[in-house]
Image (tube, helix red, strand yellow):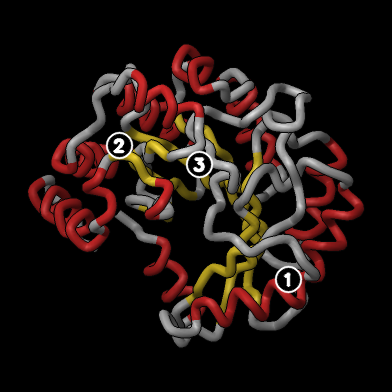
Amino acid sequence: MRMLSQVLQAQYGEKVYKLSLSSGCSCPNRDGTLGYGGCTFCSEGGSGDFAAPFAPIETQLAAAKQRIARKTDAKKFIAYFQSYTNTYGDPARLEALYREAIAPEEIVALSVGTRPDCLGAPVMQMLERLNQVKPVWVELGLQTAHDETARQLRRGYPLSVFDDACRRLQAAGLTVIVHIIFGLPGETHEMMLDTVRHVAGLQPDGVKLQMLHVLRGTALGLQYEQTPFPLLELEEYAALIAESAAILPPQTVVHRLTGDAPGPLLIAPEWTRNKKRVLNTIRRALRRAGVENL
């Protein structure tokens, strides 16, 4: 299993850290184009609760570096636009914004979180131009390969749209990273692995694996509080990670094995609060599966 931190260390000879920034974009699943309120699991922060508020890029970069100064002495960074849909807007405005974000020498790449249904021709051309300046990573929130689950989540697009976007991004030479969530309501262990198998078949450059967080202020949180549904236990989640490691292509880099949720917003599962315990449990599961330790 190739982890992102190891790949970046080998590529740049030092630690590389992400700076969470805001593009000021909304989402078609929030502004009424496709729906309101976003996906059922998505908080008001648009899955970017730790990102900076929208401000001039120079201000955001300085603030993001200051926030992480106590955690790392990294001197190289990735400009990371995570919140909401960062290709949903005027391509000219976004291109100027992203060019400014990657202009500093210490910024080595641009990472843009978006939806596969927000990658029309003008946006694709913009991303290709930026990719000539510095590497561009496009992060697609698939979550599940099962359309029925996706409908319940109010994701707003079928699997075919994701597959098409993934192939177009790859053909354009852009780095593709896919987000998968384990523990979605109604999904069995095998269904979750089916999602991993589907993603593996597309051979993305990277994947992010995450346990479902049930958050306050979301439709899913309200559903859980009214009628609790089963959630994965830590050992079950760790086993899924180990099985996924055996399914994913060797060249696919794992960007994340678990995720963080803002403490005050988290309803469940409680075990996700202890990240050290979570990572240690995953390491043990990987060792048992014969996967190289992290």
Label 3 sits on residue: 178
Above-or-below relation of 255 to 199: below
User: In the rendering, at what x and y percent does residue 160 appear?
Assistant: 60, 19
User: In the rendering, at what x and y percent does residue 46 appear?
Assistant: 60, 44
Q: Categorize mark 2 by other alpha carbons within 10 Å: few (<14), some (14-19), many (20+).
A: some
Residue drawn at 54 percent across, 46 percent down? 47
View extreme (left): residue: 288
Q: Which quarter shows the N terminus?
A: bottom left
Under circle 3, the secondary element is: strand
**Identity of the amino acid at label 2?**
Ile
Under circle 1, the secondary element is: helix
- Circles 2 and 3, Cβ within 8 Å, touching? The answer is no
* Residue 117 makes an appearance in the image: no
Q: Which quarter shows the C terminus?
A: bottom left
Q: Report the front residue among 9 and 21.
A: 21
Q: Report the front residue among 15 and 72.
A: 72
Q: Earlier in the sequence, mark 1 or mark 2?
A: 1
